[in-house]
Image (cartoon, grey):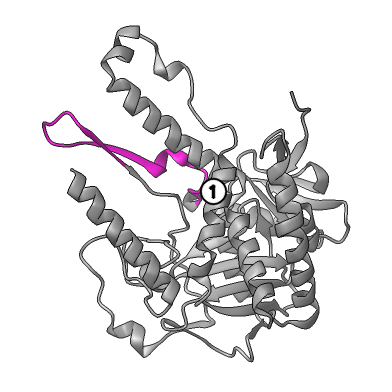
Amino acid sequence: MGSKKKQHYVPKMYLRKFSNTTKSINTYNLHNEKYVKDASIKKMCQKDNFYGEDKKMEIFLDKEIETPAGAIINKILKTNEFPQDDEEYIQLMTFLLVSEARNLKNADSTNQLVNQLAKMRLNANDEFIKSEIDLDSFKIGLKEPANIMIQNALMVVPLILDLKPLLIVERTGARKFITSDNPLVRYNSFYLKNKYPSVYSFTSRGLQLFFPISDNKCILLYDSYIYNIKNADEGVLFLNRAKEVDQLNKLFYLNAYNNLFFNQKTKERYIENLHQNNKKNHVISDLDRELDVFEEGNSGYKIMHFSTNRVSQRIDFTFLKYTDYSKQLSFPSHMGGINRKESPFIQAELERKKLQDRTYFSLK
């Protein structure tokens, strides 16, 4: 039996980018509505054996993901430039997607799905029904759910390589970027503007990925066929107005799971106001919203619909404009959305899904 070890689902090296010190950071717990000054970074965003007692995944994350990405992010913070080397750029993209896959929100969401699916199957089994076991008295889940999500994230990195990178730099002097325990934000201003049911697939037309990397710099990956970024010079956008930073902080707040993190210079009143003004729209942690079960007519069969909670509130970023091409697009009547098809990786993925669907329906 392995010994317990605290394993971080948000890297300590990442949280340090938002602090004036290497050991502590200010935080706000959304559920308790509690502001904590100089909380220990070592004690933040961790659980015992979150990735497993054998520590294989933890070692992999440290050596293959965090350490190389940390060096790349340090270069970006120093030079305001993205890596020109393809291998380094892919390493950075991998870190972003793994940051989403490895965290507690994704783990809890995965186990919520596993629990419901398993119980649906058991409730349909005649032998199990005879046992009279009360399924509501316990939960069914994976021991290390994040590990599966990390493996999936590694496979889909090519799907975001067509997105255009932008470094957003805060220069107001009056505001700092915040971050959270769910730092990568999948968003789609294009869909929300057109009131289309929010689809956040990595192949979606209009996809945006926001990822703050320090208290004054944020990475944005965006679909350049849909968006024009006003005043962006050589891949860098400087924000000189507090309102622009506030818009992004609102987005980061809405994407948080349990905790916000921020620099010691960020005032408690600012965080409290951010929370009070937006808490009604904070739905990321409401996992019950992600699952719906429907009866299929009179067949006795049940259909489960699963959709991960994402930020669905429309935020009209002042620096973002829409291309003429975006205004010519028509949305389908179904909820599959519009896909980006310029990338050969996306083309291959869409073809794979098409063949998968054909196989499924031919077997029914």
Q: What stretch is highlighted in magenta?
A: 282-304
**Is 300 included in the stretch rendered in magenta?**
yes
Seen at 88% across and 51% down, the residue is 23
115 vs 36, left or right, is left
Considering the numbered disc 1 on the image, is that residue within a helix, a strand or a loop?
Answer: helix
Structural crowding at the residue carrying mark 1, measured as other residues with C-alpha within 10 Å and reported as few (<14), some (14–19) or many (≥20):
some
**Is 183 included in the stretch rendered in magenta?**
no
The residue at the far top in this view is 131
Please identify the quarter of the rendering in which residue 357 is found: bottom left
In this rendered view, identify the residue nearer to me: 318 or 127: 127
* Residue that badge 1 annotates: 149
Seen at 37% across and 72% down, the residue is 347
Is any part of residue 45 visible from this angle?
no
Q: Position of residue 250 (x, y in %)?
A: 57, 62
Total residue callouts: 1
* Residue 191 higher or lower than 136, as above or below: below
The residue under label 1 is which amino acid type?
Met
